[in-house]
Structures are given as structure tokens and as C-alpha cells.
Image (spheres, grey):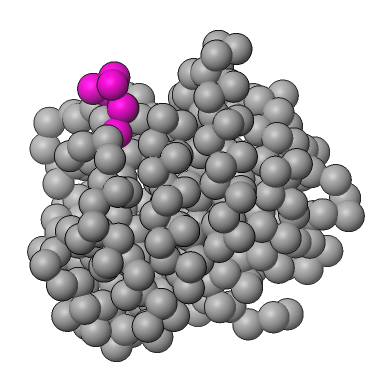
Amino acid sequence: MTGIVDSHFHIWRQADLPWLVGPMQPRIFGPYEPIRRDYPVAEYLADCRPCGVTEAVYVQANWAPARHLDEVAFVSRASDESGFPIAIVAYADMLAEDVRPQLDALARNPRVRGVRMQLHWHENPLYRFASGPDLCRDPRLQANVARLADYGFSFDLQVFAPQMAGAAELAFSCPNVTFVLQHAGMLENLSPDGIEQWRDGMRALAGQPNIVSKLSGLGTFLRRNDPAHVAFVATETLTLFGAERCLFGSNFPIEKLWTTYADLIGAHRAAVPPDAADRIFSHTARRVYRLAQP
């Protein structure tokens, strides 16, 4: 098997992230006291390298929006100093009147490969992040996301099942942009009705050929690494998207709240067919985030 690409991780200095410095805030992954500290690249590499990870994609971690370029510079320095190849999914305000000045600034850094603005909204305030449930249908956001194609940037898409119909419309309206669904659609309601709603939404998303799905963050709502749950979500997602449209992400250090990197990747390896492993753990991420082929 080729070297693993971790398509979703974070590093940080606590002082740079308002949500890690101020009072505890509701987060979809629950209490997070153990990660209210620095998580430097050296610790991340100690976690992931023994498991065969050779490259990784950093995903924005909610610095203050005005400091999104400082975040990119911080990650770039960490990559330079460690010698570890890191691509970056940065933040940009996709509800701006015109996002292009922000994208112009991001494009000056060759490590930036995409953008994430979190759109997930939930009736449960503990899971709520975006300002409203239907931002995917906002004409201004759609116009700004479409502009990503001019820069070769992807869009990391984060929504819950009830928002997936709108997310599919967003992808349809931006056919030249690759969308990377976060955390396999964040299945949080494990009742039969909840699973069916998630499956229907995932089917709608898979029907848009410019959407791929990350197998990441699967412990978020369980607060544990559950191999049976990982296998269920992976099997369902692979059935809909195919291995060429699925990619692995660790979501470290969030998942470090309840598991080790070795146990996490072990659960994912066990969940995917051996003949799909190279695509899921390497090839799809290399294609989507424009990484060098091994």
C-alpha cells in the first residue's frame, strides 16, 4: 500500500483560537477540556507517522475570521520547519459581497488547495454552528462558491442530513467545483428514521458527480472510536459514492479525545475492502487536493 494521506487534521496554538481560550462553548464533539492546549505539528507527527501517514491536509480550525491569512501562514511555517508535506484548506467568508479578494490572497500561498466555511445547522443548539439552516441555497453563497473554480480550489462541505437536499443544489449550481463532504455527512441520529434520512440525503449528494465524501469524524457523536459504527458508515458511503470518491481523514486532535491514531486507522482499515484501500487512503485525496502522485 502507498503512503497514507490524512485528508483532515488540525494543529494549533491555543492562544490563536478564541474557542480554545474563552469559556467552553457547545461543540458537536462534546466536552473538549483535554485539547484546550497547544497541539503542535511535532505531536501530530508523533501520532500519525508510525501509522504510515506521509502527507496530510490541514483543515481550518476557526481562528478569528479576520486572521484567516495568519492561520495559513502558521500552518505553512509548521510544514516548512517539520519538513512534512501539508496542503491547506483555508477559511474564506463565502457570504461576502465578493469573495474574490479573499481568494486572491489565499492563492498567493501554493499550499492552499481549498476552502471551508462550515454550514452545518441543527435544531439542537448544541450542534448548531451556521447562522441558519439553508445557507446552501443563498444566491450570494452559491455565486461565491462557484468562483472557487477559477482558482482550482475545492469546497469542504459540512452539513447535517436535513440540509443535504440544499447542499446537492449547491453542488449542482457549481459544476466546476469539487465538493468534499465532511465526516460522511455527520450521521448523528441513529434511530431508524434518522439513518433513513441520512441515507436519503447521502444518495442525493452522491448523485452529484462533483461531490466526494470524507470518511472522517465518525466518533464525533458517539464520543468513542466504534469499529462497528465506522464499518457501517463506511459501507453505506462506499456503496453510494464508490472508493474513487471516498477519502480518509483522522480529524485529529478532535478524535484524540477518545482514541489513539493507531486504533482509529485500524478501525478504518478494517472497514474498507482491501482492493479499495489505496483509493481511500491515498489516491482520492491526491486527486482532490492536487497532491503529487507517489
In the image, is 55 to the left or to the right of 162?
Answer: right
Give the x, y percent position of residue 52: 70, 60
Total numbered labels placed on residues in the image: 0
Query: Considering only vertical position in the picture, is 51 above or below 189?
Result: below
Image-quadrant location for residue 284:
bottom right
Q: Residue at x 39, y 43 (%)?
A: 166
Asked if one can make out residue 85 in the rendered structure from this viewpoint, the answer is yes
Please say whether residue 63 is one of the residues in the magenta stretch. Answer: no
Query: Where residue 188 appears, x then y in whole percent?
Result: 47, 24
Residue 113 vs residue 61, the one in the foreground: 113
What type of secondary structure mainly makes up the magenta span? loop
The one nearer the camera, 213 or 220, is: 213
In the image, taking residue 252 as reference, residue 63 lies left or right, namely left
**Viewport quadrant of the N terminus:** bottom right
Instruction: Residue at the far right: name it.
Output: 275
Query: Which part of the image, by quadrant, shows the C terminus?
Result: bottom right
Location of residue 289 with respect to 46 vertically, above or below: below
Q: Residue at x 70, y 43 (%)?
A: 240
Q: Is residue 74 left or right of residue 172?
A: left
Residue at image point 68% right, 49% down: 241
Image quadrant in which you'd find residue 282: bottom right
The image quadrant that residue 287 belongs to is bottom right
Q: Residue at x 65, y 33 (%)?
A: 233
- Of residue 174 and residue 151, the one placed in the foreground of this image is 174
Q: Is residue 133 left or right of residue 39?
A: left
The residue range painted magenta reads 121-126
x and y percent of residue 108 in the render?
Answer: 29, 88
Residue 255 in view, yes or no: no
**Vertical order, 265 against 219 (above or below):** below
Out of 126 and 46, give the one closest to the viewer: 126
Residue 104: image location, x then y, percent:
24, 84
